[in-house]
Image (spheres, grey):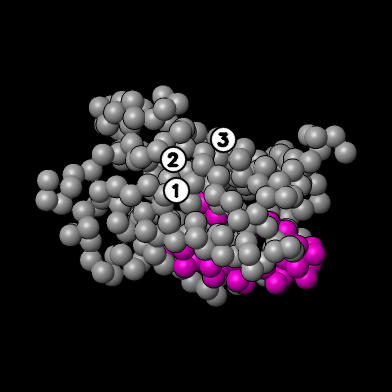
Amino acid sequence: MGILDMFRLDGKVALVTGAGRGIGAACARAFAEAGASVVIGARTQAQIDAVADGIRATGARALALPTDVMREDQLEALVKAALDTFGRLDIVVNNAGGSPPGPALKTSTTDFVNAFRFNVGTAFALSRIAAPRMVETAGGGAILNISSVAGNHPAPGFAAYGTAKGALSLLTRELAQEFAPKIRVNAIAVGSTRTEALEFVVRNPEIERRMIELTPMARLGEVEDIAACALYLVSPAASYVTGDIVGVNGGLTTLNLPMPRAFG
């Protein structure tokens, strides 16, 4: 097997949440290009249909199923659909998540808990549901969590999101220990990446300029940057990698979206 062959996913089945746009859609397209059949889950039918149609146009196989990751019954249905359609499950990407930055003193306890549930609780639920079926049908596989640089580097305004992503990174390491050697579990600590979710920030040219200035690589990330790393981590090329949090964030050692301090 040549080195490039180790990045192929021929015959494998990958499930990606939050795959109607942004990083999730880019991962789904990358996996399909590498030979996988892809199951695309997100809440908006039109978005997941568009991603699936684009994948099918390349000759790959795709299944689009509307999914609210906050509902465990829908996560169970998503896994069942993958198995019913493709007969196996090799790869799960927990990409759905997010929470806007905001002052801790103006963040309700309910909002804080919901950020935790959305970003880490859903990843735990899908991993718990999928892992036994991955072992049963494929003999093992790979789980990839999309975390954030905010989970590693504390900053004002990120008490809810940063704590949730920090917990997701730790969950990654915990499950890697528990699921080894059958299932590898890794995460990507994503930096500021051009997605629809970032549009509300970078539509202000001055904020975008400041974010780029604070990023050592002098640009914002593109979804393909994340997808390329995702492909490596779920492929045979990373067969000896588990429990790792890989930074794809332009070299950030602090957040590049300055927010005011509570008592500054």
Residue ID at (25%, 27%): 206
Name the residue beneath numbered marker 3.
224
Looking at the rendered structure, the kind of residue marked 1 is Ser
Q: Residues within 10 Å of mark 1 (few under 14, many from 20)?
A: many
* Callout 1–callout 2 Cβ contact below 8 Å: yes
Q: Is residue 109 visible?
A: yes
**SS type, badge 3:** helix
| Distance between the alpha carbons at the discs numbered 3 and 2 | 13 Å
Name the residue beneath numbered marker 2.
191
The stretch of residues the image draws in magenta is 118-146
| Distance between the alpha carbons at the discs numbered 1 and 2 | 6 Å
Q: Residue most toward the left? A: 263
Q: Is residue 60 visible?
A: no
Could you tell me residue 142's position as x and y percent? 68, 56
Looking at the rendered structure, the kind of residue marked 3 is Glu
N-terminal of the two: label 1 or label 2? 1
